[in-house]
Image (tube, helix red, strand yellow):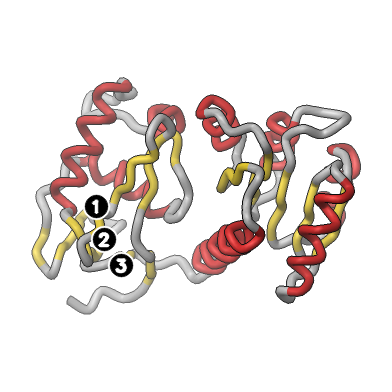
Amino acid sequence: MILFIEDDIMLSEEISEFLKENDFEVEVVGNGDDALKLLQSRIYDLCILDIGLPDCSGFLLCKKIRQFYRNPIIIFTAYENEEDIVTGLMAGADDYVTKPCSLRVLRSRIFSQLRRKQWSEEIETEIIRSGDLVIDVVHNMIFKKGRELSIKDTEFRLCYMLVRNDGRIMPRELLLERLWDMDEHFIENNTLSVYVSRLRKKLGVYNGVSYIETIKGIGYRWNHLVQRGEFNE
């Protein structure tokens, strides 16, 4: 079940009909207050949120929802400058789709987030696989094609944060809040760029595609499918 929070009646009807034709169950609500009540009383697999609501800021509503709601949130709005995108992602959104947008693109974003949700619900293991990488979470080790890479602790934490949020854009500000160096000091903006560059070089590419994608002006995203399983190297 998808909750669509949108005050534009014509738009919400068009999109909800399209999603229903694609076998999604959709419920539409036009304001933040009703959205909070529904999310606290029912189970929704995904939430699509417009920013320009009549009774509250969509960014603030996203923060409130994220305090208790753990499933994907997609912000769907005409606000398209970088500052708004970063604000939305920092508020807890998993993706940010700008209007106008083709319905097929929106559908693909929904499928992507639901796949990610399904993967995160799988039984946690100590080993994560992605492309030709094997990541040993317990021992902070990364193997590429069976060979152990020389990875520093901060680089491993950076890699793990991106892998655990695969498919989601991680804003630079969020990474800066959660990463620290060997002296237990939070790293600075320029230092983050250095760590990303070093890690990207060490991880290399898989099928010609880098593991870490730079989203200009916003942050980074893990580029390859993530699987969890046994270590059989």
- For badge 3, the amino acid type reads Arg
The C terminus: image quadrant: bottom left
Q: Quadrant of residue 117?
A: bottom right
Kindly identify which residue carries mark 2. 136
Q: Which mark is residue 140?
A: 1
The N terminus: image quadrant: bottom right
Q: Position of residue 224 (x, y in %)?
A: 34, 61
Q: Position of residue 106 (x, y in %)?
A: 62, 57
| Figure check: 188 above or below 59 | above
| Marks 2 and 1 close (CB-CB < 8 Å) | yes
Q: Is residue 224 left or right of residue 233?
A: right
Q: Nearer the viewer, residue 36 or 57?
A: 57
10 Å crowding of disc 3: few (<14), some (14-19), many (20+): many
Q: Is residue 144 left or right of residue 126?
A: left
Q: Secondary structure at mark 3?
A: strand
Q: Nearer the viewer, mark 3 or mark 2?
A: 3
Q: Position of residue 2 (x, y in %)?
A: 75, 61
